[in-house]
Amino acid sequence: MAATFDAFRYAHAHRKEVAWLSQNTNHLVPPEVVRGALDEAIAERRYEGYPPATGDPELLELVREDLGLPDAVPFLTSGGTEALYMTTRALLAPGDEVVASDPSYLIIHRFIELCGAKTVCADIYRPPFRLSAEEVAERISPRTKILLLIDPLNPLGSGYPREVVRAIAELAHDRHLTLINDVTYRDFSEGHALAAEFAPEETVTVWSVSKNCGLAGLRLGGFSASPELVRRIARYNTNDLGVNILAQVAARAALRTKRSWIGDVVRTTRENGRRVREVGRSVPGVTAPVEPSRANMTILDIGATGLSPEGVQEELLRRHGVFVRSGNYLSPAHGSQFVRVSFSNPPADIDRFARAFPEAMRALARPVAAR
Ligand SMILES: Cc1ncc(COP(=O)(O)O)c(C=O)c1O
């Protein structure tokens, strides 16, 4: 197979035929939730003007209510990604350390390295597929400035029980460290606990409307923290004129109504996830080790098949129009042994996966000449 295959370019070019199970995006929110608000904003040509620089006041209030952190100040950014960039930039200096995990959402690790700091990672690729407070504590040194708690965790889909969140938050408090609590997938996790509840002064809660509200393409997220932390981080804000006005309009409409539709989205997501794991396990040599998923994605471990995740990704995409993600960009230690499958999708997309995955794995297992 060509080493230069650009899966994203191919998938975008064929997007109308592709079942997009690769980026944990959400394709289950009823479109009418945001359509009316966006139509109206476009008819008014609101895009011709700037938004209020610090964000739509009602949206900021909705974010505050949605998180349930009345004392944390919400700050809007272009996706949670920008919030993560600003936070690391503002709080880290060369030589500093951040305690994190492998696997992880590695773009955050890249931002850390850009500051001249480094991650000190615990390998969590075994049950229960998450950090323990003890593992975090063992990695804290005099150079540590930040603890990174992604809950639920992309790519594994594992999540943190309340008592573990509390223990890690208390560590941050006791050792005077900042805790980045990335809660992008929070709505998919039953009984989710926010670290800010236990360490309000030390926690930067990074949130997003990309996954819960199905608005990834609009690029809106943010962080919430104590006024003092917000002030320090906001010095690195580049969106001095505010973030995308249409994104704010859509996010406001989605958050206003979220309670009425999120239950159905999560129920369908869970059932889809159960099916994805079942299909994965039906293939010899494949395991679905994270049970259950507390997010809208999981991993299928293909290590025992001897196949490469990039090969599986390419075969599924090119021959079946099913886009899953190879693990390499999510784990230096284990990325060559898994693919990540996301499933906030119409069940018909999961049907396609169910047909395609066993067939693709059979085809790849055969010698090339026999295909
Ligand atoms: C853990 C985590 N944090 C943050 C993000 C960034 O999301 P966005 O920039 O779309 O808000 C993602 C996206 O996949 C993610 O998985």
Image (spheres, rainbow, N blue to C red):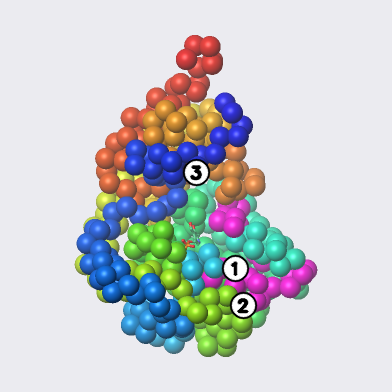
- Residue at mark 3: 8
**Earlier along the polypeptide chain: callout 3 or callout 2?**
3
Q: Position of residue 110 (x, y in %)?
A: 65, 59
- Residue at mark 1: 85
Q: CA distance from mark 3 to mark 1?
A: 23 Å
From the viewer's side, name the closer residue of 54 and 212: 54
The nearer-to-camera label among 3 and 1 is 3
- Residue at 27% of width from left, 51% of height from top? 268
- Residue at 57% of width from left, 32% of height from top? 308
Quarter in which the N terminus is drawn:
top right
From the viewer's side, name the closer residue of 67 and 249: 249
Question: Count of labels shown?
Answer: 3
Amino acid on which disc 2 is placed: Tyr
- Residue at 46% of width from left, 73% of height from top? 243
Q: Residue furthest right?
A: 95
**Earlier along the polypeptide chain: callout 1 or callout 2?**
1
Q: Secondary structure at mark 1?
A: helix
Q: Position of residue 282 (x, y in %)?
A: 38, 30
Q: Say if mark 3 contacts mark 2, CB within 8 Å.
A: no
